[in-house]
Image (tube, rainbow, N blue to C red):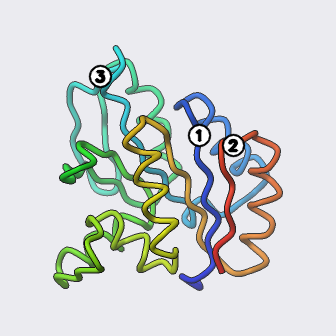
Amino acid sequence: MDKNNSIVATYSSHTAAEAAVKELQQSGFDMKKLSIVGRDYHTDEHVVGYYNTGDRMKVWGKTGAFWGGLWGFLFGSAFFWIPGLGPLLIGGPLVSWIIGALEGAVVVGGLSALGAGLYGLGIPKDSVLRYETALKTGKFVLIVHGSVDETIHAKEILGRTSPDTLDHHQ
């Protein structure tokens, strides 16, 4: 996997993000190259519990069906409380990049642990700040990692899902 090729799409709701994930899956995209980040606790859809079992995270609450369904597709999952961003559920390879940033005490010009993980994937700092702002407003961020060909293919697929933003970082 070439960490410097990424597609990042933002979605206003978990319904829209879930539709995008399903579109990627149905198109045969390698789901191990997909990460998703979101928080949705400011609505009436509170997460009231979670746990890890191996590579799977279980969630209860009204968003449980959304997050629970995603963990079956994605490689790795985590819950982080990040100052300035609050509670975030993260699934996919981005989890290992964030943990690597935390374990290595990587500090990237005032970025959060999430920002350091995104920056480590080759996403420019100004874009990282836009994605963190999107998360603060309750949006979901979908990140596809891979070769140039894979990310171009993912961009075509995600373009059909009407994301709020769709960026290709090489």
Classify the position of the N terminus by image quarter.
bottom right
* Element on which disc 3 rests: loop
Using the image as rendered, state which of residue 55 and residue 2 is in the foreground.
2
User: Which labelled disc corresponds to residue 163?
Assistant: 2
For the residues marked 1 and 3, what is the alpha-carbon distance in whole angstroms? Answer: 18 Å
The front one of 77 and 5 is 5
Kindly check if marks 1 and 2 are in contact, taking CB atoms under 8 A apart as contact. Answer: yes
C-alpha distance separating marks 3 and 2: 24 Å
Label 2: few (<14), some or many (≥20) within 10 Å?
A: some
Which quarter shows the C terminus? bottom right
Q: Is residue 59 left or right of residue 16?
A: left
What is the crowding at mark 3: few (fewer than 14 residues within 10 Å), some, or many (at least 20)?
some
Between circles 1 and 3, the one closer to the viewer is: 1
Front disc: 3 or 2:
2
Left or right: residue 82 compared with residue 168: left
Q: Is residue 113 above or below residue 51?
A: below
Residue 17, given in percent of the width and then of the height, sits at: 59, 39
